Image (cartoon, rainbow, N blue to C red):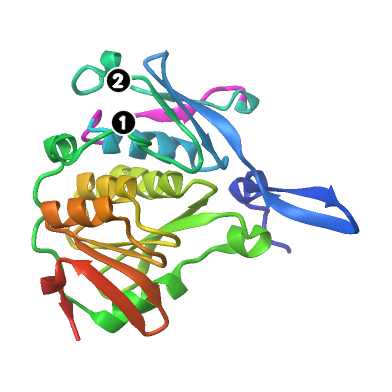
Amino acid sequence: MAAPADPVAGRMTKVVQRDGGRDEVAVEEPLEIRVDGAALTVTMRTPGHDEELALGFLHGEGLIDGPRAAGLSDDLAANVVEVQGPLLGDPGARRFYTTSSCGVCGKGSLQEVAVHAAVLAPGPTVPRGLLAALPERLRQPAFGRTGGMHATGLFDAAGEPLIVREDVGRHNAMDKVIGRALRDGLLPLGGQILCVSGRLSFELVQKAAVAGAPILVGVGAPTSLAIELAADRGMTLAGFARGTSVNVYSGEERVVS
């Protein structure tokens, strides 16, 4: 008997016509996040694991500090996820709009992140070769079919994958992983490693820091502000992780040859 179709995978991609054939492409749709029935933000994302995305986003903004009830509205076509409040602090002065390519988009500073993210715990010490190999261990089936997805993976200190999520937005993929970890009681991520499939931008370091992740690894390059924030929070930030090579930009004390 064939295995049942994955309902999440079925929402992530669609087949479109093109000249001379057909392509499978990543789905991008808006998701509205509501808290106690009140609209808070809209993000462009790939459908699937939307409850995790909402929880991860709210945690990264310092608006929740533990698991909350979250669920899709009855009409899936409405692209709405409802989260149980109350929120920490007062989000009334803020309204968020994020696209699939940008998380904080000009918002935030080192001082603002420090309000929600303590200096990180020592965390594990890991071999340089393990950090270099992590991107190859990211399961990216949707990317393999479309070429249009980012991925974030949560790994244990031995490099075994715990949670992997894909999305057209790199910050959404991170939010989905952190939201799942929040639900599973894994936060703060003091003994784990986060790995992303693209470049290392400020908002990814911010989300990782708020989640308590001591090590963040990426396939691509870090930005200057990402390095500055990682160093400020005591995070190990490693980029250009490919094959047997990786560059470590901060937190070298956790990396052994």
Residue underneath mark 2: 85
Badge 2 density bin: few <14, some 14–19, many ≥20, Cα 10 Å:
some
| Element class at badge 1 | loop
- Report x, y in % for residue 232: 12, 52
Give the left or right position of residue 227, taking residue 199 as reference: left
- Report x, y in % for residue 91: 27, 19
Picture layout, residue 231 above or below residue 241: above
Q: For the view shown, which residue lies furthest in the right direction? A: 20
Residue underneath mark 1: 68
Q: Quadrant of residue 194?
A: bottom left
User: Given contact means CB atoms under 8 Å apart, are the residues at marks 1 and 2 in contact?
Assistant: yes
Picture layout, residue 207 above or below residue 62: below
Give the left or right position of residue 18, taking residue 4 as reference: right
Marks 1 and 2, the one that precedes in the sequence: 1
Q: Amino acid at mark 2?
A: Gly
Q: Amino acid at mark 1?
A: Arg
